[in-house]
Amino acid sequence: MSELPDYLKVTAADLGKGTPVKVRILGDMASIGRDVAGAMRQEILDAQAAGRTATLIVPVGPVEQFPLLAKMINDERINCRDVVLINMDEYLADGDRFIPADHPLSFRGFMDRLFYNRLDPALAPLPENRVFPDPQNPAAVPQLIARRGGVDACFGGIGINGHFAFNEPPELGETMSVEQFAALPTRVLSLTRETRTINSVTVGGEIALIPHRAVTVGMKECLAARRLRLYCNRPWQSAVVRRALHGPITAACPASLMRLHPDAVLAVADYVAQPPNIMLR
């Protein structure tokens, strides 16, 4: 298998070895959702114990955690009214406006249906604390973070091209240093063909339904969080996880920059931890 990059040959037992990233291997897909929900709950409780309220950057995907987190909050009567949740990204329509919240692909609609609307109103984050980056005013997110004294934890996944949030790698022919890429702020951008293709799986493979534009919280804001917690639960992530952990640190694989963070943890499902099954002929 000499034709393969060395990072694709890394065994499950060796994932993360030689890097500053702590790798945790969980079980099935459901175990990822439970772990994300528990970690978010703990961030909220830890901040309350310290006499303040949590500020979290959160993704829609993985998607299993939010109903579980809502149940935890309701059952334990955790007051989250002043907790700030900053969602990573959202799809945009013509004119770089949010797609409607009732659009089936809207992350804003997803958060309402699967999380906010399931919470006891007496415990739920106030409407102004349910934040998405504004395509008409991207600077509002870093300004909010500054007022809040920083982000406690940034949660997320890894895209097929290594993107983190919708921080897409440079296109072919474009060059950007790691330092330049790490400094990219919250912004509007075009999605790559790779991202649109893999995301079309959620709509039966019809790529024409996937918007071309999005708004994303920047690498700058994500990497500045005190804790970085990434989760991977898709079988196709087996290869990109290895590239991010054991390939070069480069803007061409945005998730590889997690190795520059002082407190980064990557949790993967057990099947993601297995080396990719590549048949060479």
Image: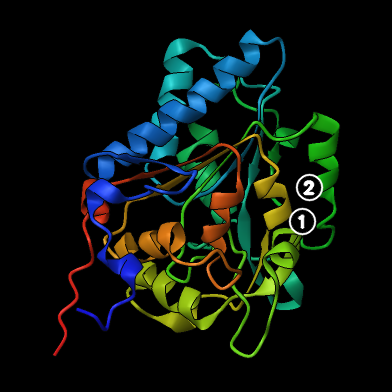
Residue flagged by tag 1: what amino acid is it?
Asp
In this rendering, would 109 be left or right of 145?
Answer: left
Query: Secondary structure under badge 2?
Result: helix
- Image coordinates of residue 54 in percent, x first then y, are 66, 25
Give the class, few, some or many, for how many residues have Cα within 10 Å of label 1's Cα (few <14, many ≥20): many
Q: Quadrant of the N terminus?
A: bottom left
Answer above or below: position of 223 versus 242: above
Pointer 1: what residue? Answer: 134
Q: Quadrant of residue 237?
A: bottom left
Mark pair 1, 2: CA separation: 8 Å
Pointer 2: what residue? Answer: 141
Give the class, few, some or many, for how many residues have Cα within 10 Å of label 2's Cα (few <14, many ≥20): many
Q: Quadrant of the C terminus?
A: bottom left
Identify the residue shown where x is 72% and y is 34%: 129
- Image coordinates of residue 155 in percent, x first then y, are 53, 42
- Image coordinates of residue 38 in percent, x first then y, are 42, 26
Query: Secondary structure under badge 1?
Result: loop
Residue flagged by tag 2: what amino acid is it?
Val
Q: Are marks 1 and 2 in contact (CB under 8 Å)?
A: yes
Q: For this rendering, which residue is in front, 233 or 209?
A: 233
